[in-house]
Image: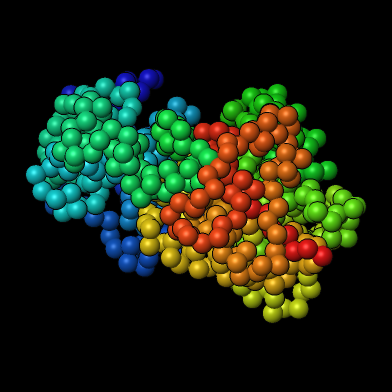
């Protein structure tokens, strides 16, 4: 079935007995759904929902219409997408966690699952742009609409403007969804609004809104509208590119487009444990990464069925993360005579959920080093324990505590420390479709304080001669280069090494070419930190989705001379 043909059951032409039977089926399904959704209510359940008591005990909002008015069952793929959007807006859930659970619950086949995924992710990513268009089509403020109605409108808008669903199906099926899931009451409004939305193409809508807002082509607000990013994020990305000598004509647009594309699945084979399973992935649609050894770009089907995945020795991990973890363990210092890491003590200060810790622990086991993984959140510490489970337990230990107090525990000094700091995640917008609309510049204030406190704590336990990798999954200046400038000011004994060298050392030829081919960076700080002494930005690595196909990870390598 093509998206154009993707229609739900019920075309309104059937006779009464069949309608009655369909209604009964729908009521049974509703009762079943209510039972199963109340059975799994936890503060943030396995599906990623954060359930407040209020939301789990409040009966699902239904329209004032009689049940007999709700004659049309939504098609299962659209219903799945709608439920994920509801979980995201009502329960603060993460779509990437809820969607697979909802797909399983609805028993969608592969094609319907694909449709539900495209619809869910597209509607969530495009939310800011779709809301602007919807606001122009509704005769009252958008936030005065019931939240489920607004979610349904977003789904309809994405089908009309972002997918190849024909207008008739997009409007009809969304109205059917509203009748089935909310009730007949708002179906007239949804029908009328979506007809207005569908009267123009996406490009025409954007041109009209841009001209009403007085934006000019290429400025941050125009790009924000066109590429569905908040304006402050566009500004931060523009500045991030410039700080690393990038941002020539069209590059910001490339980056914004990459943020809106589904990321490829990357696999890592843990050293000594998982590498031997990688050929099996290559046989079923995987390709060896040209950037890094033992990394596979997987375009096949179900990752969970690949050999080694269930055992945790082949793991899904962005190549950027793999690359940085390997680079830290291979990095030299100016005084290093012997590159042997045997006997070294490594620390992963912010380890949850354990992706990099698993690779570090396997490398530690292979090279006779030892890793302490630290994570303050209990449930995330448990994930770290599971991630490390496949690796010889002699090679690692787990601390559950605040990274800022690691120096209080008399744990001794560490030779290599990974500080993969909590951050805005603006470098991983591809993975979390709703994240860009949840974050706000005010988050930066809290996060940057935490980042600098964690940096100080890491410096405190860094051994003489040791290396500290400061890493974020964000290219925001305040979380990256400004943090490095500040820590170097607070700890003048530290040196900033060129992180490209260690990235190049562990890379395959194409990776080495990309790592070495960073454009000349701007030397003047742009924005925060202006006027202060700044570290050499050319020594800091910034990966980009549109360049390396990885998350936009930042990596600076600090060294305490012996
Ligand atoms: C970016 S994530 C780390 C990702 C991880 N390195 C991986 O590859 O899977 C940041 C982590 O820092 C943790 N964190 C938050 N506050 C912390 C603190 N005060 N001390 C240490 N870790 C903290 C968060 O719980 C989160 O798990």
Residue 210 horizontal/vertical position (percent): 21, 36
Q: Which residue lies furthest to the left in this view?
A: 139
Q: As displayed, is residue 23 above or below residue 380?
A: above
Asked whether 524 or 274 is in front, the reply is 524
Asked whether 24 or 423 is in front, the reply is 423
Residue 369 horizontal/vertical position (percent): 84, 57
Judge from the rendering whether residue 214 lies leftward or rightward of residue 127; answer left or right: left
Name the residue at 59% across, 49% down: 537
Judge from the rendering whether residue 200 lies leftward or rightward of residue 37; answer left or right: left
Q: Which quadrant of the figure has residue 341?
A: bottom right
Asked whether 357 or 299 is in front, the reply is 357
Q: How many marks?
A: 0
Instruction: Tell me if residue 475 can be seen.
Output: no
Residue 292 horizontal/vertical position (percent): 71, 35
Residue 73 horizontal/vertical position (percent): 27, 36
Name the residue at 44% across, 61% down: 444
Q: Which quadrant of the figure has residue 26?
A: top left
Display colour scheme: rainbow
Instruction: Tell me if residue 395 can be seen.
Output: yes
Asked whether 173 or 388 is in front, the reply is 388
Name the residue at 38% across, 58% down: 441
Quadrant where the N terminus is found in the figure: top left
Name the residue at 59% across, 28% down: 299
């Amino acid at each position: 079935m093509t998206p154009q043909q993707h229609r739900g059951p019920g075309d309104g032409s059937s006779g009464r007995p069949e309608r009655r039977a369909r209604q009964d089926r729908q009521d049974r399904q509703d009762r079943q759904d209510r039972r199963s959704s109340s059975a799994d209510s936890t503060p943030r359940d396995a599906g990623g929902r954060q359930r407040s008591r209020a939301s789990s005990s409040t009966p699902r909002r239904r329209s004032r219409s009689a049940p007999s008015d709700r004659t049309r069952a939504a098609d299962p793929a659209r219903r799945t997408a709608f439920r994920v959007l509801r979980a995201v807006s009502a329960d603060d859930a993460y779509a990437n966690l809820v969607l697979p659970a909802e797909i399983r619950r609805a028993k969608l086949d592969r094609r319907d699952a694909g449709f539900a995924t495209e619809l869910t992710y597209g509607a969530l990513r495009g939310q800011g742009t779709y809301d602007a268009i919807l606001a122009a089509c509704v005769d009252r403020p958008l936030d005065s609409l019931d939240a489920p109605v607004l979610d349904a409108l977003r789904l309809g808008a994405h089908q009309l403007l972002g997918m190849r669903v024909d207008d008739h199906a997009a409007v009809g099926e969304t109205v059917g969804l509203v009748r089935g899931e909310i009730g007949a009451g708002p179906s007239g409004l949804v029908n009328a609004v979506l007809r207005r939305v569908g009267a123009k193409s996406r490009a025409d809508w954007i041109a009209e809104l841009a001209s009403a807002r007085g934006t000019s082509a290429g400025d941050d607000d125009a790009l924000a509208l066109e590429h569905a990013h908040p304006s402050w994020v566009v500004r931060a990305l523009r500045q991030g590119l410039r700080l690393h000598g990038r941002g020539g004509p069209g590059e910001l647009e490339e980056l914004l487009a990459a943020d809106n594309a589904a990321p490829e699945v990357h696999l890592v084979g843990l050293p000594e444990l998982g590498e031997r399973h990688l050929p099996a992935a290559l046989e079923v649609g995987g390709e060896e990464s040209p950037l890094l050894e033992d990394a596979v770009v997987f375009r096949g089907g179900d990752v969970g069925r690949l050999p080694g995945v269930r055992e945790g020795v082949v793991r899904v991990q962005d190549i950027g993360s793999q690359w940085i973890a390997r680079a830290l363990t291979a990095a030299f210092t100016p005084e290093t005579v012997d590159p042997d890491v045997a006997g070294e003590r490594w620390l992963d200060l912010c380890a949850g959920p354990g992706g990099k810790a698993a690779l570090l622990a396997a490398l530690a086991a292979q090279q006779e080093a030892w890793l302490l993984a630290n994570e303050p959140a209990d449930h995330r510490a448990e994930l770290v324990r599971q991630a490390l489970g496949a690796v010889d337990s002699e090679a690692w230990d787990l601390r559950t505590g605040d990274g800022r107090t690691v120096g209080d525990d008399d744990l001794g000094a560490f030779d290599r420390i990974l500080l993969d700091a909590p951050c805005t995640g603006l470098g991983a917008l591809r993975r979390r479709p709703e994240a860009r609309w949840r974050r706000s510049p005010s988050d930066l204030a809290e996060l940057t304080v935490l980042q600098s406190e964690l940096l100080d704590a890491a410096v405190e336990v860094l051994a003489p001669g040791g290396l500290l990798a400061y890493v974020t999954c964000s290219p925001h200046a305040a979380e990256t280069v400004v943090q490095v400038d500040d820590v170097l000011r607070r700890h003048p004994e530290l040196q900033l090494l060129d992180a490209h060298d260690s990235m190049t050392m562990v890379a395959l030829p194409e990776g080495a070419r990309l790592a070495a081919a960073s454009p000349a960076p701007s030397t003047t700080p742009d924005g925060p930190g202006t006027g202060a002494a700044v570290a050499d930005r050319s020594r800091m690595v910034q990966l980009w989705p549109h360049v390396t196909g990885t998350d936009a990870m930042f990596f600076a390598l600090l060294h305490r001379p012996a």
